[in-house]
Each structure stands twice: as C-alpha cells, then as structure tokens.
Image: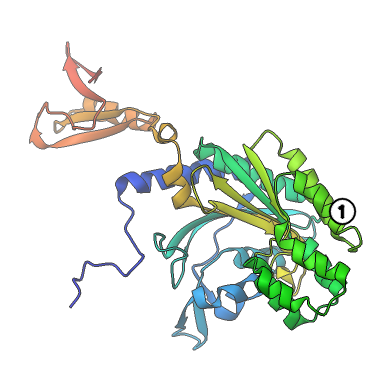
C-alpha cells in the first residue's frame, strides 16, 4: 500500500525557494509582455474535450486527461496546452477584427512527461498575436520571446529558426497525397535518409535530389544560399527562405547565435510558417518554442492569422541567474511585544514599502533574530529602529 503522502509519478511540490523563483519570474515576464501591448487572459483549467483537441490539439490527444462532466454527461479535458484556448477566446469570445495581442501564465497537465527528468505539470507562459500575417508580426513575437528569456537568464541564447512553408512548397511541387506527405514528414523529422531514398525512387532525378538534400539543410546563415540553389525551381520556397533571412537580420545582436533547419516540420498539422526554438547555453532541449499557426481558429468558425510562443516557466526559473531572484527589500526580524502600537505601526510601514518583516513568536519580548534575517528591529533610546545584521 502506498503512503498517503506520496505523489503520483512525475508530479512534485514546489517548495518555498523554487515557488518564489517561479512567481518572481512570472511577474517579471507578464510585465514584459504587457509592456509590448499584450493583454493578460486566464482560460479555465477544464473545457469540453472536443474544443481542447481542435487544431493543434489533435497532436495532444494522448497527452490530455479526460473526465466525465457530472452536470452534462459530456467528456471534459484537463488542458495539456493553452494555445487552442487562446485561439478560442480570440475567435469566439473577443471576436475582434483588428490585431489582438493576448498573453497568459497558466499550469497545464499532461498524461506523460516529455522527458524522464521532466514533470507532467508544466507552468506554461506565452503570448499570441492574432490578425496579422506580415513578417513584422513574426519578428515581434520572436523578439518578445527572446526578451522574456533574457529577463531571467544571462547565459548565451541560441535561436533555431525554420519555416514549415518551405517543406510544404516542396510537397506541393512533388504533388504528394496526404498519406505520402505524412510518410515524408516522419522521415524528414527523423532525418531518415534511407526511407527518403526508398520513397523518392520513382521521382525524377531533379526531384529526387531535392528530397535527399532537404535533411542536410541545417546550419548557420550560409545554409540559406545553399538552399536557394537547391530549391530555385520550387514555387514558394525562395520566399520562405527570404523570411528566415529577414528575421535573422532583425534579431542580429540580440542572441548569441542563430541557426537554421529548413527541413523542420515540427507541428506539421499545426504550424503554417515560421517556427522557432530557443536554447539556453548548456541545455540540450529548448526552453521556449513558437511559430505561426494560421488555421487553428478555423474550427471555431473564424479563421485568423496567428503567431505565438510558449515558455516552460518553471524550467526557465531554474536556469535563471541567482542575482535576478535576490529579494529587493530587506528581511527584518521583529520581536513579539503585545500592545506596542509604535512597533506595530513601524512593522506595517516597513511591509508597505517592500520589506519582509518576520515577527518572532518564540518568546514575549525575545531579542532573537530569524536565522535568515538581514536586519532586526531594536529599541534604541526609546525608539524602534532597523539595525543591520
């Protein structure tokens, strides 16, 4: 029999130090997003499962906990991602025809962890921009993502850029059906050249060359010129390459390195253009992902151009610089002396100005100080004063 206090696998408590880091990071980043004009929203934890699993949600079906609603008998889902909820709010609740900027900081729950060392409960922070299809919108959302990460982490940042439209243009050029697209997608994601070789055996030599070279189109900015030569006859491919080049120019100097993967097909059934992933130096998996997803709103009866990003807030807080999380106020220990109006007034004033005041509950009139305190209140010459420790 399991102890009652034991948590389910891949779930854990946030203890005081980490909870404080996550909350401080949340406040800092929500403030950053608001400064860009993004409005904070907070969708419910539960929704009808068919709403949660629309658009991008189809890929999250196995990640979604499902329960039966005692009121309606319908199946509800505990959100495993927030993006589709934000798309629903934009398309159906706000129903605005102008550009809309929304942001959020919410918990999501998944049926299984992404990695063996990750949690099934994720603190997801993100921003979504609706109603703008110009490259400027992708530049804004990517710049905001970079700005948010750099607010917390001082380590070098690498930005990995891709463009789903490039591979989709190749698929159209190859005249692939839905099943062939799915097969090619799987092989490209795995960079499985053996499978690509087999699947392209009936194609012309020119098309076969494009298919076999696609998985090799990753690296620094020099890869873009190689891609232009390879894909010169593919309608629409060159404009996608140009978009990548323009975003990289706009972000020049704001990140340590920009890399490209032109065969990136993450979110094949979801993303429709630029895709991004941000890596903090020393980490093998990205702390943030983003991209354009122009078709998610269609299922809510209102198609809207859209782009956005998500950040794993808890992971970013863990990777953040310790200096950022140093409390701005003092930590003051105060004695417990009943009915001392002067002392109570001073404690209230100190708390209002941002200091933390911990009252010693051990003994009446005790002069012991909290072990973590930086200051304490002492009565000197008949007046309560803050004394440094």
On screen, residue 365 above or below 229: above
The residue that label 1 is drawn on is 229
Q: Residue at x 86, y 59 (%)?
A: 231
Q: Residue 298 sits in which quadrant?
A: bottom right
Q: Is residue 282 left or right of residue 99?
A: left
Residue 148 on image: x %, y %: 57, 42
On screen, residue 42 above or below 111: above
Regarding residue 136, the answer to whether it shows in the image is: no
State the residue in front, 254 or 133: 254
Describe the element under mark 1 as helix, strand or loop.
Answer: helix
Q: Residue at x 85, y 77 (%)?
A: 175
Q: Is residue 227 left or right of residue 108?
A: right
On the rendered image, what quadrant is the C terminus found in?
top left
On screen, residue 218 above or below 360: below
State the residue in front, 103 or 213: 213
Q: Residue 126 sits in which quadrant?
A: bottom right
On the rendered image, what quadrant is the N terminus found in?
bottom left
State the residue in front, 123 or 165: 165
Residue 260 on image: x %, y %: 70, 50
On screen, residue 23 above or below 11: above
Q: Is residue 236 left or right of residue 189?
A: right
Regarding residue 229, the answer to whether it shows in the image is: yes
Residue 124 on image: x %, y %: 51, 57
Q: Is residue 280 left or right of residue 358?
A: right
Q: Residue at x 31, y 70 (%)?
A: 8
């Amino acid at each position: 029999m399991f102890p009652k206090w034991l948590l389910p696998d891949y779930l854990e408590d946030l203890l005081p130090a980490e909870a404080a880091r996550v909350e401080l990071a949340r406040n800092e980043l929500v403030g950053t997003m608001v400064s860009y004009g993004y409005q904070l929203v907070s969708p419910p934890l539960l929704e009808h499962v068919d709403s949660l699993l629309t658009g991008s949600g189809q890929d999250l079906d196995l990640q979604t906990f499902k329960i039966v609603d005692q009121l309606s008998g319908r199946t509800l889902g505990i959100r495993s991602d927030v993006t589709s909820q934000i798309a629903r709010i934009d398309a159906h609740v706000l129903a605005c025809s102008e550009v809309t900027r929304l942001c959020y900081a919410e918990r999501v729950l998944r049926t299984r962890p992404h990695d063996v060392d990750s949690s099934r409960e994720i603190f997801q922070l993100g921003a979504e921009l609706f109603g703008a299809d110009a490259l400027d919108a992708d530049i804004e959302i990517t710049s905001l993502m970079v700005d948010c990460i750099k607010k917390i982490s001082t380590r070098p940042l690498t930005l990995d850029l891709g463009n789903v439209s490039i591979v989709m243009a190749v698929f159209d050029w190859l005249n692939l059906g839905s099943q062939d697209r799915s097969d090619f997608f799987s092989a490209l994601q795995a960079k499985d050249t053996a499978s690509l070789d087999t699947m392209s055996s009936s194609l012309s030599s020119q098309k076969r060359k494009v298919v076999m070279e696609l998985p090799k189109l990753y690296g620094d900015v020099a890869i873009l010129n190689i891609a232009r030569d390879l894909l010169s006859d593919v309608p629409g491919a060159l404009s996608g390459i140009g978009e990548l080049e323009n975003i990289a120019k706009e972000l020049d100097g704001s990140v340590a390195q920009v890399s490209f993967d032109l065969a990136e097909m993450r979110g094949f059934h979801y993303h429709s253009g630029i895709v991004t992933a941000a890596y903090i130096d020393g980490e093998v998996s990205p702390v943030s992902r983003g991209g354009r997803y122009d078709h998610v709103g269609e299922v809510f009866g209102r198609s809207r151009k859209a782009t956005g990003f998500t950040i794993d807030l808890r992971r970013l807080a863990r990777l953040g610089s310790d200096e950022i999380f140093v409390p701005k106020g003092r930590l003051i220990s105060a004695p417990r002396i009943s009915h001392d109006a002067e002392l109570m007034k001073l404690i209230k004033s100190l708390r209002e100005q941002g200091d933390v005041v911990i009252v010693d509950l051990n003994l009446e009139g005790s002069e012991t100080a909290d072990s973590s305190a930086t200051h304490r209140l002492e009565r000197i010459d008949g007046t309560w004063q803050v004394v440094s420790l």
